[in-house]
Image (cartoon, helix red, strand yellow):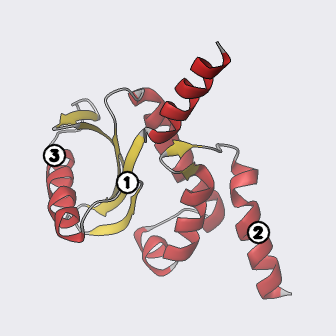
Amino acid sequence: MRRVELCCVNCWRNVRMIKFVLMVNQQGQTRLSKYYEPVELSRRAALEAVAVRCCLSRSKHQCSFVEYKDFKLVYRQYAALYVVVGITHSENELSIYELIQNFVEVLDKYFSRVSELDIMFNLDSVHIILDEMIQNGHIVETNKSRILAPLTAIDKMADG
């Protein structure tokens, strides 16, 4: 019995629930991209273009979940930015929708009303926030204070 349990746990570790996270503006320009499984650079541009077109072409009254090929897109618009997350078919869309909301709230807390320029000029900080929330395609933290703790420490050392 124990061997079967370990096998199932190991199988789930290898399945990436979140495939990628994108932040794009209304013109379709990618401001942030983070992939949790290997994708060739030549395919990334095409994948991002298709994902962005799928999301930008939809009206505000349509669902924020889109099925595309071997994954689903969950997206949310905040002012001029879209946050797009590619997930496996087995992942819960609503949990990812809430993850996007939490991600933006953390960005707002850190940047005091985040804007596209904050993302562009502080990309390293945004990546740290995202890395604290998602590791290896799995959600590992949602507590805003714990997510911001490394950046707070870095900022204290820089001011110090």
Q: Can you identify the residue that label 3 sits on?
A: 54
Residue 94 location (% of width, % of height)? 43, 28
Q: Can you identify the residue that label 1 sits on?
A: 37
Name the kind of residue labelled 2 in the image: Thr
Query: Can see residue 78?
Result: no
Name the kind of residue labelled 1 in the image: Glu
Q: Nearer the viewer, residue 157 or 17?
A: 17
Horizontal side of 94 relative to 46 (left or right) equals: right
Quadrant where the N terminus lies?
A: top right
Residue 116 location (% of width, % of height)? 41, 69
Q: Nearer the viewer, residue 135 or 79?
A: 135
Residue 86 location (% of width, % of height)? 32, 44
Sequence order check, earlier mark of 2 and 1 = 1
Residue located farthest toward the right when viewing the structure as drawn: 160
Check disc 3 and report its element: helix, strand or loop.
helix
Check disc 2 and report its element: helix, strand or loop.
helix
Determine which of the numbered discs, if any, sits on residue 152 in the image: 2
Q: CA distance from mark 1 to mark 3?
A: 21 Å
